[in-house]
């Protein structure tokens, strides 16, 4: 007996935040790593599993440029994406 599922699942193209590869995930998913990298990232300490977010309060374009220059020095080490 064949079962046909004609339901459409919305997907989006995503890049892996570990290897930089492209993959497709469901729109309601929040995974940031491709299926090949998920087990590798599970072996990492929890602080390395998600990308870090930096919030900086600035009042002018000059301050933004200064913050970006400082962050460039801090965030030199990164992924392949």
Image: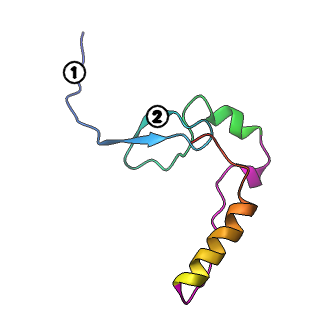
- Tell me the crowding category of disc 1: few under 14, some 14 to 19, or many 20 or more residues within 10 angstroms, Cα based: few
Give the residue displayed 62% in from the left and 70% down from the top.
68
Q: Earlier in the sequence, mark 2 or mark 1?
A: 1
User: Does residue 66 appear to the left or right of 46 in the view shown?
Assistant: left
* Residue 59 to residue 1: above or below: below
Give the residue displayed 57% in from the left and 40% down from the top.
33
48 vs 65, nearest the viewer: 65
State which quadrant residue 6 falls in.
top left
What secondary structure is the magenta-colored segment mainly? loop
- Tell me the crowding category of disc 2: few under 14, some 14 to 19, or many 20 or more residues within 10 angstroms, Cα based: some
- Rounded to the nearest whole Å, what is the CA distance between mark 2 and mark 1? 28 Å
For the C terminus, the quadrant is top right
State which quadrant residue 65 falls in.
bottom right
* Residue farthest along the bottom direction in this orientation: 59
Residue 19, horizontal then vertical, whole percent: 60, 35
- Secondary structure under badge 1? loop
Q: Is residue 53 magenta?
A: yes
Q: Residue 22 got which mark?
A: 2
Residue 56, horizontal then vertical, whole percent: 62, 78
Q: Residue 76 got which mark?
A: none
Give the residue displayed 68% in from the left and 48% down from the top.
78
For the N terminus, the quadrant is top left
- Secondary structure under badge 2? strand
Give the residue at mark 1: 4
- Counting labels gives 2
Residue 21, horizontal then vertical, whole percent: 52, 33
Q: Which residues are magenta?
A: 44-60
């Amino acid at each position: 007996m064949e079962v046909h599922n004609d339901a459409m699942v919305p997907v989006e193209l995503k890049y892996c935040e570990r290897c930089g590869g492209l993959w497709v995930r469901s729109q309601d998913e929040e995974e940031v790593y491709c299926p090949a990298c998920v087990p590798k990232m599970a072996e990492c300490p929890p602080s390395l599993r998600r990308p870090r977010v930096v919030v900086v309060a600035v009042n002018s374009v000059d301050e933004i440029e200064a913050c970006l220059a400082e962050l460039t020095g801090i965030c030199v080490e990164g992924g392949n994406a």
